[in-house]
Image (spheres, rainbow, N blue to C red):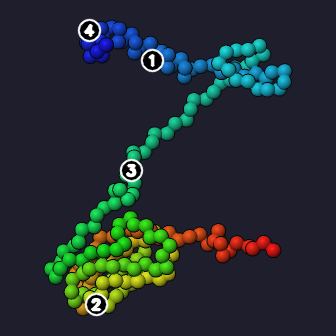
Amino acid sequence: MNLQRFTLRRPAQLLACVALLAALTSSLCLAEIYKWVDKDGVTHYSDRPAPGATEITVPPVQTYPSPPPQALPGPSTAPTVAPVRSAKGACELRSPKPEEVLQNVPSITLTFRGPEGLSPVLMLNKKRYTAERDSNSIKVEPASRGSYEADLTFVNDRKEVVCTVPTVTFYVRQPSVINSPARRKKPG
């Protein structure tokens, strides 16, 4: 049956179906509930009365409006970080990549590229790390588990920021110390 023909040729039947559906759903919402205890002491609940049953008044369900959905960051939606151009060249954080997970690493090595003659300044979780002029990496030890935010800038001799890389978030996962084989007690 073509629904479009049905709705256009028989609007009275469609209206009757909608009214019947509304009546059925509202009666389900207002259903009576009965409670009784049988001779064995078992409590029963039903929508039909039984001998010795009492009607229970059920309060309406408390509801809350849900907040609008928010996009969650993840590997599939990770932003790509394009190199930022400055007057003297490009600056970029080459590794780790945005949303990358580093597994079981003793240290974090951040590699980057920047304009010649400038000094890199790395802020890793609000802690400052610097490297030699024209260097292309900074090593951070030890690599604790958790999430990291890396902010990289390049400064000139007057400590003026010449080039900035957008913040990159990455994660370090380490094995648990609690369940490590070294901590297990040996029988004996």
Which residue lies under the disc numbered 4?
9
Circle 4 crowding by C-alpha within 10 Å: few under 14, some 14–19, many from 20 = few
Q: Which mark is residue 133?
A: 2
Camera-side residue: 15 or 186?
A: 186
Is residue 51 depicted above or below 40 in this figure? above
Q: Earlier in the sequence, mark 4 or mark 3?
A: 4
Vertical position of residue 138 compared to residue 148: above or below: below
Query: Callout 1: few (<14), some (14-19), or many (20+) C-alpha neighbours within 10 Å?
Result: few
Pinpoint residue 114: horizontal percent, then vertical percent: 24, 81
CA gap, disc 2 and disc 4: 81 Å
Residue bearing the label numbered 3: 70
Element type where label 2 sits in the image: loop
Q: Position of residue 148 (x, y in %)?
A: 43, 71
Q: Residues within 10 Å of mark 2 (few under 14, many from 20)?
A: some
- Residue 49 seen from this side: yes
Q: Amino acid at mark 3?
A: Gln
- Name which residue lies at 70% across and 72% down: 184
Tell me the kind of residue under disc 2.
Arg
Q: CA distance from mark 4 to mark 1?
A: 22 Å
In front of the other: label 3 or label 2?
Answer: 2
Residues at discs 4 and 3 in contact (Cβ within 8 Å): no
Q: Does label 3 or label 1 sit earlier along the sequence?
A: 1
Q: Residue at x 26, y 85 (%)?
A: 155
Q: Position of residue 32 (x, y in %)?
A: 63, 19
Tag 4 and tag 1, C-beta contact below 8 Å: no
Q: Residue furthest left?
A: 87
Residue at the spot of label 1 = 22
- Mark closer to the chain start, 1 or 2: 1
Q: Label 4 is placed on what type of residue?
A: Arg
Specify the quadrant of the image occupied by residue 111.
bottom left
